[in-house]
Amino acid sequence: MKIDLRASLRAHNTFGFDVSAQYLAYLQNKSDVVEFISKAQSEKEPWQVFGGGSNLVLAKDLSGYTALMQIKGKSLLKETSTHFYIEAMAGESWHEFVEWSLNNGYPGLENLALIPGTVGAAPIQNIGAYGLELEEVFESLEAFDRLTQEFVTLNKSDCKFSYRHSVFKDEPNRYVVVSVCFVLPKQWQAKLSYAELEKAFAHQHSLKPIDIFHRVCEIRRDKLPDPQVIGNAGSFFHNPVVTNELYQQLKQQFPQLVAYPSGQQWKLAAGWLIDQCGFKGYKVGRVGVYEKQALVLVNHGGGTGEELLQLAEQIKKKVKEIFKVSLTVEPVIFN
Ligand code: FAD
Ligand code: NAP
């Protein structure tokens, strides 16, 4: 296993924050995972495993051991008369895996096209977009369990998925995911619950999964900043889920409020709340709020994680003051 000393993480986080790792390891097979964890533990050093760094705020240099998950491979595991079971190793690019699944005739992941990062990180926050969440197509995963020191298989209920949440967030650094298996029904059904997709395909007969894939990519390219150009980690806050009582109060006070039913509760569009507070396009020093989508905080170049976290605090405070709603940060913070 290759380990670099005092390595820059700038190219390994999509905000482009210029921090370093004391030791940076590259995990290319399952034995590397075991070696990495036993090395960090025997030296009593802190450790963490990253994928593509697209859901991180790195606000300081990291001490101890950091690893980049780079285990590759994807395949059809099995098929039944009704379902395909496909698997990808944790270091595969999520978007390339989605593209591969469609090109090989296993539809069902197309709504999750163009989400940055790796397959192994996808279950961590139960990634979701355009009306599909990972948990809906998830079968199981294999992970190294730090507590038992062995590889384990976790099924859907073990993972305790909820909205942008899972057991991996409750127990950080317990598991290192090495592969994920998805189950996709052979009888494909288009998911068009989001207005932009519904509008695009309202009159299209014989809709194919690849059409949705391309449309999702187009919409995302149009609305979201490309991390290669402007540093960002996608949505910076979760959409708050509030009681019906609070929703009714807010709706009366703010008739334009953007909200969607979520079980017995309501999910408020956090981007709308932030926009109403006047932050869209706001800049403070070298960081700011993206001009097309107030939910996305950006590094215009040369900014720091600390500056970004200060801006996030300012936004949270204002949203709380005006709407009485607490925003929670989505990316994982190292400060
Ligand atoms: P990282 O940022 O490297 O890591 C995130 C967390 O997962 C860290 O805690 C890390 O320790 C842990 N982790 C990573 N790999 C492993 C592993 N193998 N085992 C155990 N723990 C691991 N998210 C959505 O849900 N929906 C979206 O539509 C979406 N759009 C985005 C758009 C943009 C432009 C950007 C920049 C981000 C977007 N995101 C979205 C957020 C992000 O892409 C996802 O959360 C993604 O799954 C993170 O993957 P990563 O490999 O970059 O993880
Ligand atoms: P949008 O379409 O402008 O919608 C704003 C918010 O309203 C979204 O966050 C979405 O919640 C919710 N929403 C919209 N239509 C809905 C419907 N029919 N039913 C239930 N909820 C609905 O959002 P956007 O910013 O352009 O993002 C589009 C999609 O990509 C969303 O699903 C979003 O989650 C995803 N995305 C996620 C990230 C990230 O980093 N997490 C970054 C970019 C985009 P949901 O977020 O619950 O879907």
Image (cartoon, rainbow, N blue to C red):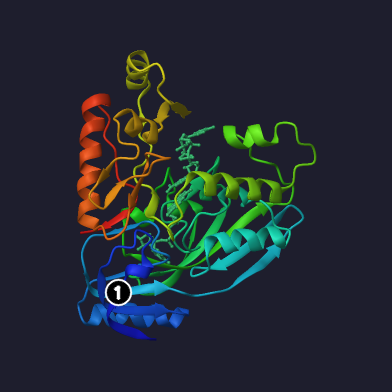
- Quarter-of-image position of residue 41: bottom left
Asked if residue 85 can be seen in this view, the reply is no
Q: Nearer the viewer, residue 300 or 294?
A: 300
Percent x, y for residue 90?
49, 68
Vertical order, 220 against 63 (above or below): above
Q: Nearer the viewer, residue 156 or 25?
A: 25
Q: Amino acid at mark 1?
A: Ser
Ligand 1 quadrant assignment: bottom left
| Residue positioned most to the top | 252
Question: Dot 1: what SS?
Answer: strand
| Residue positioned most to the right | 206
Describe residue 170's horizontal placement relative to residue 223 as left or right: left
Percent x, y for residue 175?
37, 65
Percent x, y for residue 204?
76, 36
Q: Residue at x 42, y 57 (%)?
A: 227
Vertical order, 60 against 165 (above or below): below
Q: Mark 1 — residue? A: 8
Describe residue 133's horizontal placement relative to residue 81 as left or right: left
Percent x, y for residue 259?
43, 27
Q: Residue at x 33, y 68 (%)?
A: 10
Describe residue 148's horizontal placement relative to residue 82 as left or right: left
